[in-house]
Image (cartoon, helix red, strand yellow):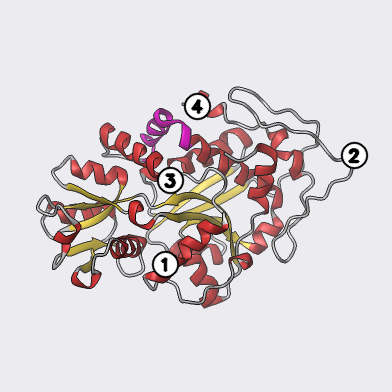
Amino acid sequence: MKTERRRWRLKLSALFAILALIAAACGDGAADTTTTAAEEETTTTPAAGEETTTTASEPELESTTLRVGFSGQPDFTQIMNFVWLDELREDYGIDAEPIIFEGTSPPFRALVAGEVDMVVGQVPPGILLRAETGADVVMIAGDVQQSDYLLVSTPDVTTLEDLYGKQIGTAGPGAVSTSLSVAALSREGIDVDQIEFVEIGGTSARMAALLAGQTAAGAAHFAEGFNAVEEGLNPLYVIADGVGAYLFHGVWASREWVEANPNLVQLAIDRFIESVRWAATNKDDYIAAAADVTEGLSDDAKSRAYDEFIRIGLFAVNGGLEDELLQATIEIEQEVENLPADVEDPANWVIKDFVESYLERFGEQ
């Protein structure tokens, strides 16, 4: 696997060819990429197995420490995030540490408190944090652009209409397992007022409740869901088929930290995008990497889950900050009243400079 991953590796000098020209972001988050004739360099997109060369000097990283907060990790859907941090450690000497939190809001609170430098987390908590506290947190990339949830049910529930009068287990009010279940069912013409959504906990707890007959259905990440199907449950509905495009995770940081660490941020985002591209094109290596961070999943469940990732277009290979994707995500959360009708303009909290710099150098896919 590591050999294959290195085919995607960008040499540090290539990554820094433009970093040397990036100054600290301005107040609106824009990075100055103006170059002089003497500074201009020509770079090429690396083909598999090739290395990119450049003569540009390598600017010094502002820090060699990177603490990244995650919610509910590890799971099979975000193996690329662990590959990302591994490569930052192994290839660039960055002390990249994953810090795991329970729930969606705690990583953001830790970000504001300075306990983590970045958060790979959902979009609504970041928007609400800005609105409720005034914290200037910004999103600088995204990785998952579809829901990875499978609505799993007991064997007697074979249609969505069979859910009427029954209970669906979720992680609770405001959780994405709730909001996306409600949004998908509503878009399929199901009257969600005739279904009871009950707080059970995370994916494992929801599947355990189903197997015990305590609920009729529950949303599970694909791999965990297909694993539960092997135990006799029913794969009722793929939620992405109902909600469509949805930015499940974004990379968040404080604006102040981004402005103080533009070289480190650019290196991290370059490698972040590469890790997502690797995930979208290397099924066998992705599954092999999952063995290091997940347990209890069958090979068949992991294989089926990955195939679903590709079918629905899960991986955001171009940085995940397209305006249409952001707007679709906001609208879905507004539909289920997780976000207010009036949401702050994304231009105030999305910084695209680092993604755009990567795409200018290495192209879109």
Residue 18: x and y in percent read 75, 42
169 or 340: nearer the viewer: 340
Q: Which callout, 3 or 4, points to the residue nearer the camera?
A: 3
Give the residue at mark 4.
Answer: 2
Q: Is residue 250 above or below residue 55?
A: below
Q: Say whether disc 3 or disc 2 marks the residue closer to the N-terminus.
A: 2
Question: Judging from the image, what secondary structure is the residue with disc 2 in?
Answer: loop
What is the magenta range?
279-293
Question: What residue did someone put label 2 on?
Answer: 38
The location of residue 248, given as percent across then percent down, is: 44, 55
Q: CA distance from mark 3 to mark 4?
A: 23 Å
Compared with 171, 220 (above or below) is above
Earlier residue among tags 2 and 1: 2
Closer mark to the observer between disc 2 and disc 1: 1
Amino acid type, callout 3: Leu
> Circle 2: is it few (<14), some (14-19), or many (20+) Cα within 10 Å?
few
In front of the other: 307 or 138: 307
